Amino acid sequence: MKFPGVVYAYYERKLRRSLIGDRIPEHIGVMVDGNRRWAKLAGAPTSDGHQAGADKILEFLGWCQELGVRMVTLYMLSTDNLNRDADELEPLLDIIGNTLDRLGEEGNLRVQPVGALEILPSRLAKQLTELGESTGDADGLHVNVAIGYGGRREIVDAVKELLRDAEAEGKGIAEVTEEICDTRISEYLYTRGQPDPELVIRTSGEQRLSGFLMWQSAYSEFYFCEALWPDFRRVDFLRALRDYASRQRRFGS
């Protein structure tokens, strides 16, 4: 092992020992950003960056399981991403499909689709549905895969479904209006029944949400990391957890 590797290994162990179990977030949202820039810097095809990012997802989920994180939401493909050129989008969809297969092969992951499946190619939507069903009883790490996801669309879809249910129950507009509150809308989100993320991590140095879990992250802590997603290391993750553990969370203005 080279000297820098020894130093990093020591630093990583030190960071790990500094973490307190009850300060590990139960639910972490991750914006896996920077794959295209990673490929450009490497002088490689864009698809190589997406593949490197997919490989990092599997590695990252292993870290989460080691540390006792119970739930992860991965922002893998936004509604805006579906507008990319076919030359990039088609290989990306193939990589996502292969990654879903790999998640299913892990055996203990509960994988839940989080997004508008109806706007995805039918083969990918079918794969997501079947993966969610086949892993639904798994008792390991709960992994939300946000594919075909947009935060504004999620809220609109939630309100539409709430109104459709109200109509089916014969409720009038006045009654529905009186019932609408944040709790009711939460019951119709893609992540209904789940705890909101305590921590949201974004890689690549960008410091914006880009529509990720807009409703659920109202009181989340945010951690922005300069590393591009394929370069994100376990030590970077531990730093994010240490930073989270040091904060005094406040649920208000």
Image (tube, rainbow, N blue to C red):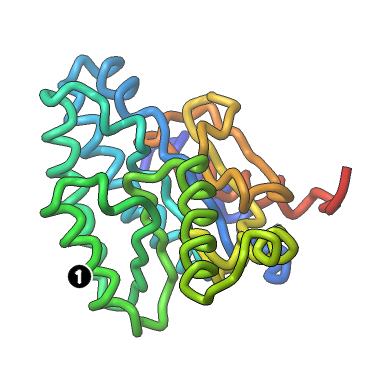
- Locate residue 93 relative to residue 1 in the image: left or right: left
On the image, the x and y values in percent for residue 222 come to 66, 41
Q: Position of residue 37 (x, y in %)?
A: 34, 20
Residue closer to the observer: 238 or 109: 109
- Quadrant where the N terminus sits is top left
Residue 228 appears in the picture as rendered: yes
The image quarter in which residue 131 lies: bottom left
- Image quadrant assignment for residue 175: bottom right
Q: Residue at x 50, y 67 (%)?
A: 167
Residue 247 lies, in percent from the top left, at: 80, 49
- Mark 1 Cα shell of 10 Å, populated few (<14), some (14-19), many (≥20): some
Vertical order, 248 against 91 (above or below): below
Q: Is residue 44 left or right of residue 205?
A: left
Tell me what residue is drawn at x 54 percent, y 69 percent.
Answer: 166
Seen from the viewer's position, the closer of residues 197 and 61 is: 197
Q: Quadrant of the C terminus?
A: top right
Element at label 1: helix
Which sits in the foreground, 114 or 224?
A: 114
Q: Taking 20 as reference, is 14 above or below it? A: above
